[in-house]
Image: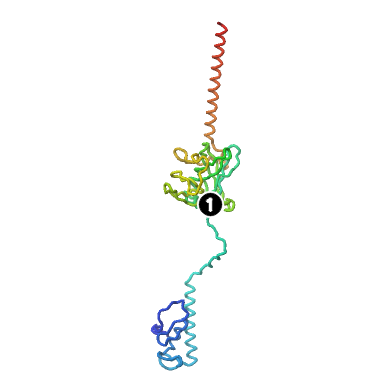
Amino acid sequence: MLLSSDLSLFPMADPAAEEVQCRACGHMIPQANIQLHALRCNAPHTPSEPPQAAHGSPMDADEEDEVLQQVLDMSRREHEATAAATPPQAAAPSADAPKQSRRKYYRFERQDLDTGEWVPLGDTTSRYLSRKLRDEGVGDFLHEIRHVDATDGMVRGFGYQISLLSSGSSGEGTQDNRYNGERENVRWREVDRDLLGDGPDLCEPWQCTSCKYTNDFPGGTTCVMCLSMKPGCRPVPLARATAPPPGGFTVVLPPVRGPSGRIQPPTRPGRQQRQQQQQQQQERQRQQGQEARQQQQQQQQQQQQQ
């Protein structure tokens, strides 16, 4: 039986060291054999002298084999216990292995009210999306997109208030187009990062140098607090047109669904209002024209009577 006092011959050493020096005889002993050496070392003795057992009598070959087997068995049991208690470690990734991005990207589209076609609206990332969604993925969030308007070539899209009705790899909702006052259907789906093209990260937070506000809108180049340009960005045409509308953004109501569950064509109060204004203006012009003709006829009749 090995006693703890037998191991007092060896100092506390680095477990990673292969050998430890015996305090009694000065020999360098492998770490795996220090227990066996503690039984055999009868210091002081010289390397030329045969090692003595603790009781002072030399060990024969059978005794050495027996003690060695005991030490080996004890070392094996300790190794097995240590291996069982240590969780397996995953292999370290290779330096040449491609980095896997956990961020997902989504593409937004809006439905054109005149043609019914779905046109690109913009892109965002899951980091921004997951931070803004509420109530298990359903809620309102402000989505900023910068694009060139095909009608006049100006940069549009400071912000859209979008109401998402579902979560996951795709969804649908509505938005109020702040440039024409009309409500539009929108939808979004997960896309591959390669489809988004080159350019800066769509959702990298940046701090405004003017007001120190941290902006995290995807692709944003204008501070939402003070409307200052993002450092390093050049001003765009009609920068004032990209400012939020007076009173801020409006909250979007869920779209109307039919019996089949599909979104019904949205109402267009902005267009109806413009049509009513045009009709009223045409009516006023018609009345003014009639009054002018009546006055002209009266003048002609008076001249003829004279």
**Residue for point 57% across, 11% down:** 300
Q: Nearer the viewer, residue 118 or 226?
A: 226
Task: Give the class, few, some or many, for how many residues have Cα within 10 Å of label 1's Cα (few <14, many ≥20).
Answer: few
Percent x, y of residue 252: 49, 41
Which quarter of the figure has residue 34?
Answer: bottom left
Find residue 114 and report its horizontal and vertical position in percent: 59, 37
Nearer to us in this view, 79 or 257 = 79
Q: Quadrant of the C terminus?
A: top right
Looking at the rendered image, the quarter that the N terminus falls into is bottom left
Please say whether residue 261 is visible from this viewpoint: no
Q: Amino acid at mark 1?
A: Pro
Secondary structure of the residue carrying tag 1 is loop
Which color scheme does this rendered protein use? rainbow
Residue 99 place in picture, x, y as percent: 55, 60
Compared across the picture, whether 26 is left or right of 115 comes to left
In x, y percent, where is residue 296?
Answer: 56, 14
Q: Which residue is mark 1?
A: 200
In the rendered view, tell whether residue 266 sits above or below residue 19: above
Which quadrant of the view contains residue 42?
Answer: bottom left
- Can the viewer see residue 270? yes
- Residue displayed at 44% across by 38% down: 247
Q: Is residue 111 left or right of residue 130?
A: right
Count of numbered labels shown in the rendering: 1
Quick one: 264 or 71, which is closer to the camera?
A: 71
